[in-house]
Amino acid sequence: MPQVEIPRRYRGPTGGAANVEVSGESVRACIEAVEARHPGFLELVVDADGSLHRFVSIFVNDEELPRDALDIAVAGPDRISIAAAAAGG
């Protein structure tokens, strides 16, 4: 099963879990599977249109995905990492 690595700042909905193993055939399906178990997670990653928030990056097996590639296929051992940029001033 793919594993989704949750950045520290997004672990509120996951109860502090840093990794969530899910079933899903695409990156989007895996993120939605995390949401199904941990409501409130999805809105941290994607906007109302289903696009990545501008300050979020997704990596599959350490390779950054293009912003429009959430529907890319994943397989059993794949690792999906979510990176949340810190903003401030």
Image (cartoon, rainbow, N blue to C red):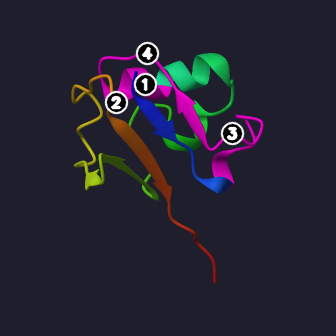
> Going from the N terminus, do you reach mark 1 or mark 4 first?
4
Disc 3 residue type (three-letter): Ala
Q: Is residue 46 left or right of residue 38?
A: left
Circle 4 residue: 23
Q: Residues within 10 Å of mark 3 (few under 14, many from 20)?
A: some
Q: CA distance from mark 1 to mark 4?
A: 6 Å
Q: Please report contact status of discs 1 and 2: CB closer than 8 Å, yes or no.
A: yes
Residue ranking furthest to the front: 77
Q: CA distance from mark 1 to mark 2?
A: 5 Å
> Going from the N terminus, do you reach mark 1 or mark 3 first?
3
Q: CA distance from mark 4 to mark 2?
A: 10 Å
Q: Which residues are magenta?
A: 9-31
Instruction: Pinpoint residue 20: horizontal percent, then vertical percent.
Output: 56, 31
Marking on residue 45: none
Q: Who is closer to the viewer here, 76 or 81?
A: 76
Q: CA distance from mark 1 to mark 3?
A: 15 Å
Disc 2 residue type (three-letter): Val
Circle 2 residue: 27
Instruction: Pinpoint residue 17: horizontal percent, then vertical percent.
Output: 68, 39
Disc 1 residue type (three-letter): Cys
Circle 1 residue: 30
Against 85, residue 34 (above or below) is above
Marking on residue 17: 3
Image point (75%, 43%), residue name: 16
Image point (22%, 49%), residue name: 66
Camera-nearest label, 4 or 2: 4
Instruction: Pinpoint residue 47: horizontal percent, then vertical percent.
Output: 49, 38
Secondary element under disc 2, as helix, strand or loop, is: helix
Instruction: Pinpoint residue 77: horizontal percent, then vertical percent.
Output: 33, 30
Image point (59%, 24%), residue name: 35
> Going from the N terminus, do you reach mark 4 or mark 3 first?
3
